[in-house]
């Protein structure tokens, strides 16, 4: 799990195995056959899960996040995202330039006004969700772990991050 700064909590911090199991089960139940997610996590470390039922994901480019955070240092980014978004964030360093995914509750597509710069992925989309033990680069890993079953970023917090990052980027273009 993660503390309020987004850092992964160590096993010494007293995180209950039951809590880890509950969070894992919550994600696995996005599939009609949850055991498929468990097999993928066990074999590959990442399960491909459908979006739009339990959660959506907002795709955030590294450039946008780094502009909002004013840093590219992984520890600084994790701490900022943990405090600003107060919900789980995945990073995929396999994509060109890297991509962050803020997990949030599903909303209607028309309610998301940043589709052009930070696309909201929902129904009919899938996301690679790493096992909760993948908290270090490289590949797909957690930057901010979920703290409890159903823990998600608030859309307004994600909007604030997108607004801040895009303002910095548009100012850099002038």
Image: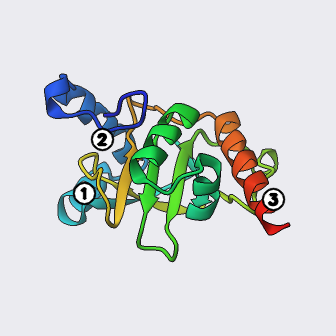
Residue position for label 3? 171
> Farthest residue toward the right?
174
Q: In the rendered image, is residue 153 in sight? A: yes
Q: Quadrant of the C terminus?
A: bottom right
**In the rendered structure, which disc, 2 or 3, sits on the residue that comes first in sequence?**
2
Q: Nearer the viewer, mark 2 or mark 3?
A: 3
Q: What secondary structure is marked by label 2?
A: helix
The residue at 61%/63% (across/down) is 63
Real-space Cα separation, disc 1 to disc 2, in angstroms: 10 Å
User: Between residues 120 and 61, which one lies in front from this camera angle?
Assistant: 61
What is the number of the mark on residue 153? none
The residue at 51%/77% (across/down) is 96
Residue position for label 2? 24
Crowding at dot 3, Cα within 10 Å, few <14 / some 14-19 / many 20+, comes out as few
Name the side, left or right, on which 34 lies relative to 39. right
**In the rendered structure, which disc, 1 or 2, sits on the residue that comes first in sequence?**
2
User: Between residues 103 and 3, which one lies in front from this camera angle?
Assistant: 3
Q: Quadrant of the N terminus?
A: top left
Residue 89: x and y, percent? 47, 47
The residue at 25%/34% (across/down) is 20
Name the side, left or right, on which 76 lies relative to 124. left
Q: Tell me if residue 66 comes above or below residue 147 in the rendering.
A: below
Crowding at dot 1, Cα within 10 Å, few <14 / some 14-19 / many 20+, comes out as many
- Residues at discs 1 and 2 in contact (Cβ within 8 Å): yes
The residue at 74%/60% (across/down) is 169
What is the number of the mark on residue 41? 1
User: Between residues 165 and 172, which one lies in front from this camera angle?
Assistant: 172
Q: What secondary structure is marked by label 3?
A: helix
Q: Nearer the viewer, mark 3 or mark 1?
A: 3
Real-space Cα separation, disc 3 to disc 1, in angstroms: 41 Å
């Amino acid at each position: 799990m993660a503390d309020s700064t987004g850092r992964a909590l160590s096993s010494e911090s007293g995180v209950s195995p039951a809590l880890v199991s509950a969070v894992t089960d919550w994600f696995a139940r996005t599939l009609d056959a949850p055991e498929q997610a468990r097999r993928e996590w066990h074999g590959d470390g990442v399960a491909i899960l459908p979006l739009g039922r339990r959660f959506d994901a907002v795709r955030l480019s590294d450039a946008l996040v780094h502009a909002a955070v004013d840093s590219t240092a992984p520890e600084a980014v994790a701490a900022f995202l943990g405090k600003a978004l107060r919900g789980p964030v995945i990073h995929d360093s396999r994509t060109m330039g890297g991509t962050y995914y803020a997990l949030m509750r599903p909303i209607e597509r028309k309610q998301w006004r940043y589709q052009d710069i930070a696309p909201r992925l929902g129904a009919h989309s899938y996301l690679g969700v790493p096992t909760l033990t993948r908290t270090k680069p490289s590949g797909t890993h957690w930057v901010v772990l979920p703290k409890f079953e159903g823990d998600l970023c608030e859309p307004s917090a994600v909007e604030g991050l997108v607004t801040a990052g895009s303002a910095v980027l548009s100012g850099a273009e002038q």
